[in-house]
């Protein structure tokens, strides 16, 4: 019996590391590899797919939060309070776009988790 949340967290860390090392395509390939790792740890096809999906969603949410914080900080340093507000709106838009794009990463993570779970049976 595997550990669903441990698998999801480990898969998220692998996705995060691959996305940081290879921006762009690394997030998608890292999502697949992270989902595979999550599936190996979670054990079983269904649990592996769920752990992979959770790992992919975590990656998208963290990117959205970091985009929001980054834009608010950049806007506040360059334009004061109004710049912070405008940076917050820009970060919110980029965050929403990041979550929409993260759906593809979640799909790749789910497929990886399915395959990882298939191996552990």
Image (cartoon, rainbow, N blue to C red):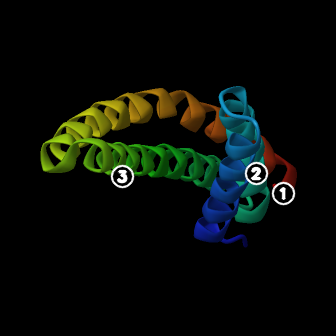
Q: Are marks 2 and 1 in contact (CB under 8 Å)?
A: yes
Distance of label 1 from label 3 (alpha carbons) = 39 Å
Q: Is residue 48 above or below residue 75?
A: below
Q: Are marks 1 and 3 in contact (CB under 8 Å)?
A: no
Residue 7 x, y percent position in the rendering? 68, 63
| Nearer to the camera, 86 or 66 | 86
Q: Quarter holding the N terminus?
A: bottom right
Foreground mark, 3 or 2?
3
From the image, tell me which residue sits under label 3.
Answer: 69
Please indicate whether residue 62 sits to the left or right of residue 107 in the image: left
| Nearer to the camera, 72 or 5 | 72
Q: Which mark is residue 65?
A: none
Residue 56 x, y percent position in the rendering? 57, 44
From the image, tell me which residue sits under label 1.
Answer: 120
Q: Earlier in the sequence, mark 3 or mark 2?
A: 3
Q: Are marks 3 and 2 in contact (CB under 8 Å)?
A: no
Residue 22 visible in image: yes
């Amino acid at each position: 019996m595997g550990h669903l949340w441990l698998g999801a967290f480990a898969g998220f860390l692998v996705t995060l590391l691959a996305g940081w090392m290879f921006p762009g395509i690394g997030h998608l390939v890292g999502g697949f590899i992270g989902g595979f790792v999550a599936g190996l740890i979670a054990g079983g096809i269904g649990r592996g797919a769920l752990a992979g999906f959770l790992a992919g969603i975590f990656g998208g949410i963290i990117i959205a939060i970091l985009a929001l914080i980054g834009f608010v900080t950049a806007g506040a340093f360059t334009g004061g309070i109004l710049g912070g507000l405008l940076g917050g709106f820009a970060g919110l838009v980029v965050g929403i776009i990041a979550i929409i794009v993260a759906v593809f990463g979640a799909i790749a993570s789910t497929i990886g988790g399915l395959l990882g779970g298939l191996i552990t049976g």
